[in-house]
Amino acid sequence: MITPLNIQTTYPKVYIDRQLPKVTIDQYECFAEAGLKNNTDFAKECVEYTNSQLSEGIDRIVSEGNRMASIEKRMPDAIPEIAFDNTFDNKDWNIDIMPKSMPKIDVEGYLNLEWEMGKLNFYKESVLNYKKGNEVGNSINMGL
């Protein structure tokens, strides 16, 4: 005789906590190297360039004045040499690859998974507990 099988089930549970990814790309350094700056940085760069040109100009004028002051020491003609030096501009030529710096990439977001294991319990009832019917003598009459 087949006895009934009771199954008790607890289903597994999954808890998902997530934040969708948010990607932030900052390319300001790359653009700044190419000369595309905001107003504040552009003004700072102009001030630095102006100060350096001012210092170079003052140094050049002082050295020319010192050269002309040394005429009394029987130096060669200073005025034609100074005029010749100031005639031509010295230009620098460069070839460069831009941008040199990498963009700053920030990624925010998370995924948290938690789970509870499920349970599966089997219970088999005894034949004696399951009997239904009339007992006559030593024989058992099972009414299904």
Image: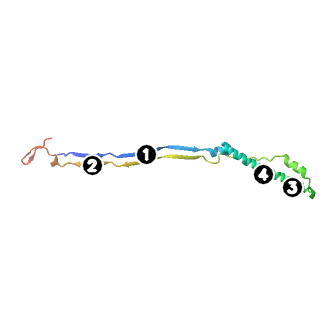
Secondary structure of the residue carrying numbered label 2: strand
Q: Nearer the viewer, residue 142 or 91?
A: 91
> Mark 3 and mark 4: span between their CA atoms?
17 Å
At label 4, the amino acid type is Ser
Instruction: Tell me the residue at 87%/50% (across/down).
Output: 82
Under circle 4, the secondary element is helix
Q: Amino acid at mark 3?
A: Asn
Marks 2 and 1 in Cβ contact (< 8 Å)? no
Q: Which residue is mark 1?
A: 17
Q: Amino acid at mark 2?
A: Asn
Residue 126 left/right relative to 137: right
Whether residue 104 is visible, yes or no, is yes
Task: Tell me if label 3 and label 4 are in contact, CB under 8 Å.
Answer: no
Which-is-in-front pick, marks 4 and 2?
4
Q: Mark 3 or mark 4: which comes first in sequence?
A: 4
- Residue holding disc 4: 55
Residue of label 3: 66
